[in-house]
Image (spheres, rainbow, N blue to C red):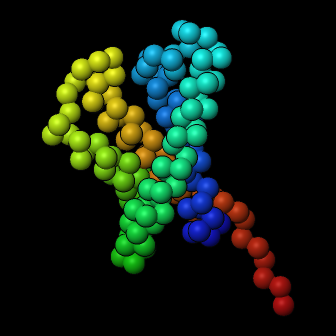
Amino acid sequence: MNDSKALALSPLITPFAFTIYAYFADISGFNMDAGILTFIGYFLGVAFASIPVAYLYMFFIGYRFYRLILKKKKVNFFSLTLGGIFVADIPMLLIWPAAEVTGSTGFYTTFQLFSFCGFMVGLSFWALLNFGTKPQPERY
């Protein structure tokens, strides 16, 4: 699979990664205590809210990061997953000085949630680059 297809498909994992981490972190609404319909509603809400943001991040920040590591010939599993974590954590790093740990979901849980989503986007991007399609034989 070429770079542009992998860039276009990898942000689609964001709502699934968000929901999986929120379920295991026992975040209210995602832990299914209120029922499956509430869970599905939250998942759809996260999908509608996160996919446009993930695409903005991927095309404006992640693509530039990818071009930089491609130019340096450092494209590997670690650079893509750690780069995904860093790109996803940019908004959390910006609000870190003003963050207060109050409420049911604290700053550190949200930071881990964003980090996991970034890791999963980087992992899916790496997987799509490496295992996307089989090479086609050359025809003469």
**In this rendering, is residue 95 above or below 101?**
below
Q: In this view, does 40 lie to the left or right of 83?
A: right
**In this rendering, is residue 85 above or below 68?**
above
Q: Depth check: 91 or 8 in front?
A: 91
Most extreme residue toward the right is 140
Q: Is residue 136 left or right of residue 49?
A: right
Q: In this view, does 76 lie to the left or right of 45?
A: left
Most extreme residue toward the left is 97
Q: Depth check: 57 or 112 in front?
A: 57
Q: Which residue is drawn at 63% across and 64% down?
A: 5
Residue 76 appears in the picture as rendered: no
x and y, in percent, of residue 27 in the image: 43, 19
x and y, in percent, of residue 42 in the image: 56, 26
Residue 7 appears in the picture as rendered: yes
Q: Residue at x 29, y 42 (%)?
A: 92
Q: Give the quadrant of the C terminus.
A: bottom right
x and y, in percent, of residue 69 in the image: 38, 70
**In this rendering, is residue 24 above or below 47?**
above
**In this rendering, is residue 126 above or below 66?**
above
